[in-house]
Image: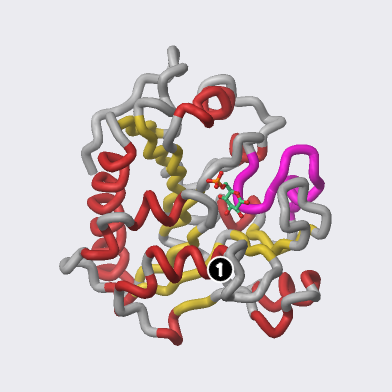
Amino acid sequence: MAKVFSFPSPDDVSHALETYLAQASATAIASTGRFTIAITGGSLPATAFKFLKASKSVDFSKWHVFWGDERCVPYDHDDSNYKLVKEQLLDHVNVPKSQVFPINQALVGNSAEAAKDYHGQLAFDCILLGIGPDGHLCSLFPGFPQVNEKEKWVTHIDDSPKPPPHRITLTMPVLNNAKEAVFVVTGSGKSEMFKTIVEDRDMGKPSTHVAPASGKLYWFVDDAASQHLSAVKPSTFKL
Ligand SMILES: O=C1O[C@H](COP(=O)(O)O)[C@@H](O)[C@H](O)[C@H]1O
């Protein structure tokens, strides 16, 4: 069962994520010596890292950073999810370059090759996810076959309904293989969709398919996003 944590404001969501990520990272480092995380794009990096990027207690030198999805554009393009995460986190902390795994830029323009290139033994401690207003996550869009991929851990889409059209994305098998999956949603604009996913469990929405085998699925949202919930009661934020 997913746990929903709802906070009065987007800044409160950012503070709670700072606490959550600091603890998730410390726990993983204590047991395996590293923290593997997959991060998506859109509005998530700004919310998730607003305060974390200034943290002095997190050992970023042990972080291994991957992307949940990427648009096939150069690293310095405004549509690049790599650029977003770089600007919102990596430029401010000391994750070694050798532990940052963006989509292979040399393969931009050949999305099938790039997906193959990114396929590996991906087992994450944590995956940070956003949802789109249509219920998509990563680059897994409603009604598109990539949502039902059962074998490949990384795939590509060349007709994304949201621009740009060419993208690489992790698939449900790798998302559900993560130790912890964490959705971040703020603002009233996504409140109806948030309810559709969390409460109505509409399987037509790709985000509803996220159910890590570990059972650890969290939603960090603000009260504007959770305003339509009735059956699901937000939990008190306590790790
Ligand atoms: O296209 C994408 O959209 C989703 C949601 O983005 P948001 O701006 O509505 O928060 C994002 O999670 C994904 O990484 C991105 O490529």
Looking at the image, which residue sits at the far left? Answer: 57
Q: Looking at this rendering, what residue extends furthest in the top direction?
A: 230
Secondary structure category for the residue under label 1:
loop
The residue identified by callout 1 is: 122
Magenta span has 146? yes
**Can you tell which quarter of the image residue 144 is in?**
top right
Residue 208 placement: quadrant: top right
Q: Taken as a whole, is the magenta stretch helix, strand or loop?
A: loop
Please name the amino acid that badge 1 sits on.
Answer: Leu
**Is residue 55 shown in magenta?**
no
Which scheme is used to colour this image of the protein? secondary structure
Task: Say if 122 sits above or below 138 in the image.
Answer: below
> In this image, 44 relative to 173: left or right?
left
Which is nearer the eye, 108 or 6? Answer: 108
What residue is shown at x 21% (from left), y 38% (from top)?
238
Question: Which residue is more in the foreground, 197 or 56?
Answer: 56
Magenta residue span:
136-150
Q: Could you tell me residue 64's position as x and y percent? A: 42, 74
Q: Is residue 229 above or below residue 177?
A: above
